[in-house]
Image (cartoon, rainbow, N blue to C red):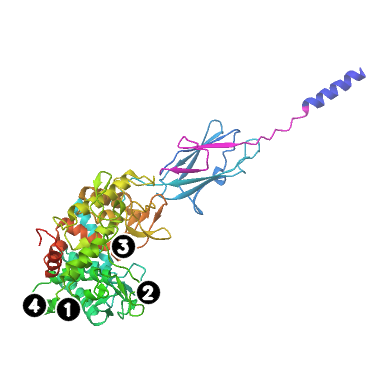
Amino acid sequence: MKYFFLFLIFTAFSCSKKEAPQIKDSSVSFTIDGQYNCTLEYAVGMRPAIVFNFTEAVKADNLEQYIHLKEGDTEVSGIQLDVQAEWKTIQLVLLNDLKSFTTYTLSISGNLPTKSEGKIVNPLTIILNTGLDNTDKFPRITDEELLTLVQKQTFKYFWDFGHPVSGLARERNTSGNLVTSGGSGFGIMSIIVGIERGFITKQDGFSRIRKIVSFLKNDAQKFHGAFSHWLDGTTGAALKFSEKDDGADLVETSLLMQGLIVAKQYFKASVAEETQLRNDISELYNNVDWNFFRKDGGNVLYWHWSPNFNWQMNLPVKGYNECLITYILAAGSKTYGIPKAVYDNGWASGTNFRNGRTYYGVQLPLGPEKGGPMFLDHYSFLGINPKGLSDAYANYEQQTRAHALINYNHCKENPNKFAGYSEECWGLTASDIKNGYTASSPTNDRGFIAPTAAIASLPYVPEESMKALRFFYYKLGDKLFKEYGFVDSFSIQEKWFASSFLAIDQGPIIIMIENYRSGLIWNLFMSSDEAKEGLIKLGFQSSNL
């Protein structure tokens, strides 16, 4: 009886004792849009489907304390966390689209408790990279309205941001007092477009150009009639472009003269102030001693001369590049005109002059491998009309179109597999890039598209260029289309968008859109005695001569 009583006591005690609950930790796995790529970094759309799966049930209370989606240090709002599968699955639902071209950090803390008070044994930090948001950023308008809008916004670079003293164009939107001679030539032509498009009055445009011409005549430092690449916009003093480039730049002078000649042809009224403007422009052009830049009478022009370093830059102007305008204007001068032999033996003797090879099914008459950067066939042809223009070396309508098509087809085929390149997203030329500047081309393609390359090719390849223009504006406009038109360049690959604007890139946009629409700048320049004399002297043929 004694043993039976003890047995009952032991049994009762054993039955009343509760087992301590077992703590179970959990591991977590995940999918992004239904996929796991064995990494912690994903390219995603604007609303990716994000699912976490746990080996143990988790507590559903205060999940937002443990699961975070951040852009930098900022928590993304509009997130819903749905618990499923008996607390073993959490779906993260985005109530709003993510931003395009943005990096987000998605994290799940190891402190997220399981129902058994365990923890997460493999806390996660996942990188989400968004790309292109394919929605339109601006309302659709007609192509004609879009062209006008782009011209008007781009015009502001030269009008609103023109130097207050000289009226000349600043090199870039961060240049302060530094102005550029070639870019100012582009600016002058842009002002003519602005008048014709009704962005400003003719009198206001005339006053600005008169200010520019007066400054160039009376204040700007000159070297044998030529201007430096950069000038002080207040004093006119030459500014160094590089250590030994502190004097004349003949090519920049040519680009400036191209614009001045267009202005001379536009302001044709017999009134005294327009007559004086024309006379002053003629004086500036006639004072350029083109023959001096042959360096002792040689059969080639030289790019630079310095009062301090003489000819030490030693850069002959040989084709094929952006400098055709230099030889045309040098030949057209009645005061210091060069003979045709300088064109044939100098310009046409360049190692990259003749090409004749075929790329992407397109034969390229002149220029470097695959055409080089697009500016080579933009700067001279802002004024010179390549339509129907030919000489002993090329048909320039074919040349400019071929160059643009090769540039387009390279980006379309995208041999380097850069993100974003397509038949709508193309254009390689000299521009700012991330952490620098480069002359992008099919043989120097680093993944950066410059809007000016495609847009300024409108007269050459209108269908391909309009595709690009629509894409830049509608699909990327929130990133690209700013206070002075399109920013200088961008890279979808790098998720990088320039904040800069350059005179030499904004100018061709507004001018070549106008040449595509009306031929205005081409007609003005080609009607000038300077252009006719130079082109005919060098053996060019065109119905426009």
Residue at numbered disc 2: 244
Residue 8 percent location from the top left of the image: 84, 21
Question: What quarter of the picture does the N terminus occupy?
Answer: top right
Snapshot quadrant of residue 508: bottom left
Seen as rendered, the residue at the extreme right is 2
- Is there any visible trace of residue 139 in the rendered image? no
Residue at disc 4, secondary structure = loop
Instruction: Determine which residue is flagged by label 3.
Output: 483
Q: Which residue is mark 1?
A: 283
- Write down the residue under mark 4: 271
Q: Is residue 152 magenta?
A: no
| Mark 1 vs 4, N-terminal side | 4
Q: Residues within 10 Å of mark 1 (few under 14, many from 20)?
A: few
Rendered image quadrant of residue 531: bottom left
Distance between the alpha carbons at the discs numbered 2 and 4: 44 Å
Marks 2,4: beta carbons within 8 A: no
Residue 242 position within the rendered picture, expressed as x and y whole percent measured from the top left: 38, 71
Rendered location of residue 313, percent (x, y): 35, 71
Which amino acid, mark 1?
Answer: Glu
**268 left or right of 374 in image:** left
Do the CB atoms of the residues marked 1 and 2 lie less than 8 Å apart?
no
The kind of secondary structure the magenta stretch mainly shows is loop
